[in-house]
């Protein structure tokens, strides 16, 4: 999750003047999910002890599910905003 957040931030920063594809929104969503996972790990470590970084199948699947959810919300917002006006052209035909 943190890797995707860092990559989307780098892509947004390189295109910040002309953020047509709303990479800022994607970056913020991914950093929010990364922060949520980090706080969850810290609280679990402080309350239960054990491993701080959990490398299990369930944790990996959860990371992918969070990533897919963030990408899905971003895609929906992009389709609603229609930054290049493509959907409006199709609707008008």
Image (spheres, rainbow, N blue to C red):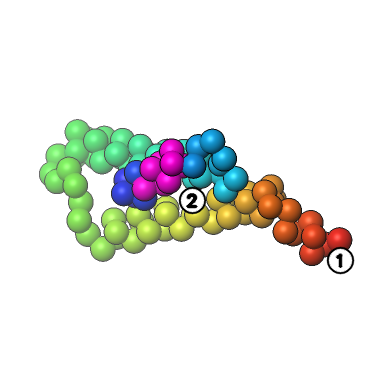
Q: Residue at x 19, y 47 (%)?
A: 53
Residue range (magenta): 7-14
In the rendered structure, does residue 9 fall within the stretch colored magenta?
yes
Task: Tell me residue 15's x, y (percent).
Answer: 49, 42
Main secondary structure of the magenta stretch: helix
Q: Is residue 27 visible?
A: no
Task: Locate residue 5 relative to residue 81 in the image: left or right.
Answer: left
Q: Is residue 70 visible?
A: yes
Residue 17 % position (x, y): 54, 36
53 or 21: nearer the viewer: 21
* Image mark for residue 20: none
Judged left or right of residue 66, residue 54 is: left
Q: Which residue of the protein is positioned furthest toward the right in this rendering?
A: 93
The mark nearer the N terminus, 1 or 2, is: 2
Queried whether the magenta region covers residue 43, the answer comes back as no
Camera-side residue: 87 or 30?
Answer: 87
SS of the residue under disc 2: helix
| Tag 1 and tag 2, C-beta contact below 8 Å | no
Q: Quadrant of residue 36?
A: top left
Per the image, the residue denoted by label 2 is 70
The residues tagged by marks 1 and 2 sit, at their Cα atoms, a distance apart of: 32 Å
Residue tagged 1: 93
Going 36% across and 48% down the picture, which residue do you hit? 7
Q: Residue at x 36, y 56 (%)?
A: 62
* Left or right: residue 51 compared with residue 93: left
Rate crowding at label 2 as few (under 14), some (14 to 19) or many (20 or more) other CA atoms within 10 Å: some
């Amino acid at each position: 999750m943190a890797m995707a957040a860092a990559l989307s931030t780098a892509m947004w920063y390189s295109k910040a003047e002309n953020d047509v594809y709303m990479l800022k929104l994607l970056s913020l969503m991914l950093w929010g999910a990364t922060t949520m996972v980090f706080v969850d790990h810290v609280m679990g470590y402080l309350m239960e002890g054990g491993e701080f970084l959990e490398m299990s199948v369930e944790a990996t699947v959860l990371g992918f599910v969070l990533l897919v959810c963030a990408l899905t919300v971003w895609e929906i917002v992009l389709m609603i905003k229609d930054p290049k006006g493509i959907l409006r052209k199709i609707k008008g035909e």
